[in-house]
Amino acid sequence: MQARNLILLGVAVFVGLIAVLLANSYFSGVEQRQQQVAEEQKLSRIVVASQDLAFGTPLSEQNLRMANWPASSVPVGAFTSLPAAMKDNRVALRPIVVGEPVLTSKVSGADGRATLSANLPIGKLAFAIPVSDVTGVGGFVRPGDRVDVLLTRNIPGSGAQATDKMTDVLLEAVPVLGIDQVSDEAQTKPAPGKTATLEVDTLGAQKLALAVTLGQLSLALRNVADPVAGPQMTVVPKHLTNGNYFIRPQSPTPQLAAAPPRLPRVPSGMLGPVRPKGPTMVVYRGSQSSEYEVQRGW
């Protein structure tokens, strides 16, 4: 019985080896035939994705394959062999779809890390600004989108009130690199975030840094194919209506001069004797005195 089991095991191993050899021979023949077709039709062999690759996915034989490509239109940075594409433990820095060529600009370098800095073009910076479910377009702004950045602040000037506001378009068609800690462009499901990381130049980063301290920043989602319109006007409260409606300040009512107080009229019987205006003399008759006005004779 034991000898029979050993025989059966040996037969199974032999059949397995034959299957492996046949499979290798088949795939080798397919690869050789593809190379022959490429040579006959003047095609090049480049590495493409055999399945969708998300941000940070390691490159391997399971998600890559060789494909024929017109020699006259091979993309710049394409890999011509699988070992070259998988060297240094490369990972995808941007989403790559099935059948898309794997390019050096879309994968990591020798460090093999999927970092945001490696995904930035030369001369560009990543700058994060605070947003909410309202200022972030309800969570519909996702990595890979383009947005306009609006700044709402108080109107400057000593005569402005706390309710006097103005809104400017600070930046236009800015690429969104990430929302919170999500930078995968394949994540398209709406999700409100607290920060938005934008791709800007140095001047744009300076504007954003100053604007955060002056007022409230809001994002406006833009179609990626929509061209930039150029300088925009500043919107103030009077632009929110169809007409120039406003309340004029009321001028103070002029105060009339106060009339002198009117004294009560005294009956003539209650008035005392009229005192003479000129010199007088007093004549005493016993215990009574009388005052008389002296007439001047000169």
Image (cartoon, helix red, strand yellow):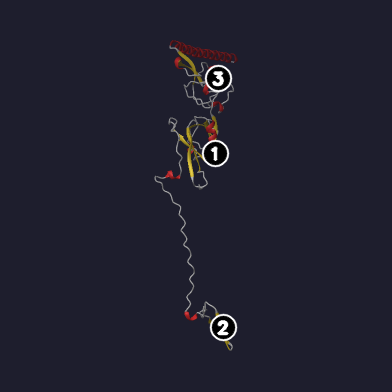
**First of labels 3, 1 by sequence position:** 3
Q: Nearer the viewer, residue 16 or 154?
A: 154
Q: Disc 1 or disc 2, which is closer to the eye?
A: 2
Q: Residue drawn 54% across and 41% down?
A: 214
**First of labels 1, 2 by sequence position:** 1
Q: Disc 3 or disc 2, which is closer to the eye?
A: 2
The correct choice, above or below, for 116 with respect to 21 in the image is below
Label 1 and label 2: CA atoms lie apart by 98 Å
Mark 2 crowdedness (10 Å alpha carbons): few <14, some 14-19, many ≥20: few
Label 3 and label 2: CA atoms lie apart by 141 Å
Q: Secondary structure at mark 1?
A: helix
Q: Are marks 3 and 1 in contact (CB under 8 Å)?
A: no
How far across and down, in percent of the image, does residue 172 sit? Answer: 47, 33
Q: Which residue is mark 1?
A: 212
Q: Which residue is mark 3?
A: 86
Q: Which residue is mark 2?
A: 282
In the drawing, does residue 73 fall left or right of residue 85? left
Mark 3 crowdedness (10 Å alpha carbons): few <14, some 14-19, many ≥20: some
Mark 2 residue type: Val
Q: Residue drawn 48% across and 41% down?
A: 167
